[in-house]
Amino acid sequence: MRNEAAWQLDVRPAEVDGPDTLLIVLGGRWCIDQNLPSADTLTTRLAPPVCRVRFDAGKLTDWDSGLLTYVSGISKSCMDRGIAVDHSGLPPGAQRLLAMAFAVTEQKLAGRDNGRQGTFTQVGTATIAFFRGAPQMLGFLGEVTLSLLRLFTGRARFRRRDLWLEIEEVGPRALPIVSVISFLVGLILAYLGADQLKLVGAQIFIADLVAIGMVREVGALMTGIIIAGRTGAAFAAQLGTMQVNEEIDAYKTLGISAIDFLVLPRILALMLMVPLLTLYSGFIGMLAGLLVSMTIFDIGFFEYYTETLRALEFKQFAVGLAKGTVYGAIVAFAGCLRGMQCGRSAEAVGHAATSAVVTAILLITIAASIMTIVFYQLGI
């Protein structure tokens, strides 16, 4: 194919390299204002025995993006077919631009590759992701542990004001949602217990069930799950957004530990406030049990109050506080971990927030099971 007034194109087997090499000779003016040929016209020539394509632009007089479009189209077709491409015959500027274009990896966009996967594929993908993420999780846990040690020795660098701001955010501002959920859970426990206790005329023990259940186990568990959805996701989104804006990279450049400055205040805030929220949750749950007992089962206020005091012991409060502290640390750890692992896009921030909640709830469930078994074996 030839256009004497503008561009020139000659495609033939290379005489020097052999019949397996296709030589594309470019000449004349290859600019976007010309009626340039399409790269698709050569797809039929990219067949065996061709295994290599080479360009020769020795007769080229002028070029712009039109040349790059044509060459990149042929190069992509060759790559799809496993054919090697030699750009050394092109102008140096074109070689550099093509190298930059093919060096950028394709972005993974939302909604792409959402085809249905088989069960074994999903299980395998999840297993691989777990084993790849476990070392990162252990490494982050080690960094947090070292940061806590620096705190105890007075060498941790963070602003005390940030700690008080986080305490206000995760504590007092979480009271409304904790109150609603704890009250409803207390109602549920009271009704479930009453349905069985009334068979033997022992409705008074509703107070024991609600008090011990809320203070020892349910209050801490529900508070941990609420905080995971409310605060853990917020931590992941905040740190993820900082990753997108390269703020964390700026801290590292300035020699400031991101773990000390960003993660440590959040972990301390949750470890301090979740136990208190657990006690508050237990109190609200007991009020719900009192309401059900007085209005439905004709149990007096002083009877319920006396039975509650008889049922509760110091060890019940100690177990609840211990579990609340552990759950708070888990939520902060999961939220900060996923935030620090976040990618550099808005989609990655959303994935980080979702993953933080899932990770926190999973770890809370595991911790609750282990602590329940340990306390039972210890007789606590």
Image: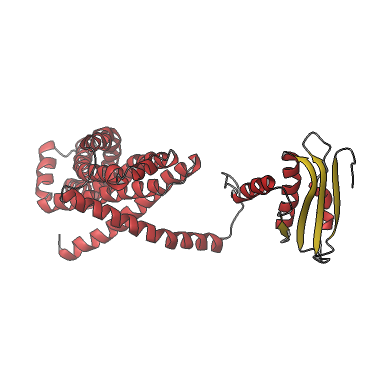
Q: Quadrant of the C terminus?
A: bottom left
Q: Position of residue 22 (x, y in %)?
A: 81, 59
Q: Above or below — where is 8 with respect to 126? A: above
Nearest the camera: 157 or 215? 157
- Residue 357 visible in this rendered orientation of the protein: no
335 lies left or right of 55: left
Q: Position of residue 325 (x, y in %)?
A: 22, 49
163 lies left or right of 72: left
Residue in the picture at 19% in, 65% down: 377
Nearest the camera: 213 or 152? 152
Nearest the camera: 61 or 144? 61
What is the number of callouts on the image? 0
Tell me, what colour scheme is on the image? secondary structure
Q: Position of residue 369 (x, y in %)?
A: 28, 59
- Residue 146 visible in this rendered orientation of the protein: yes
Nearest the camera: 143 or 192? 143
Q: Above or below — where is 71 with respect to 295? A: below
Q: Position of residue 39 (x, y in %)?
A: 79, 47
Query: Image quarter for residue 67?
Result: top right
Residue in the picture at 9% in, 43% down: 306
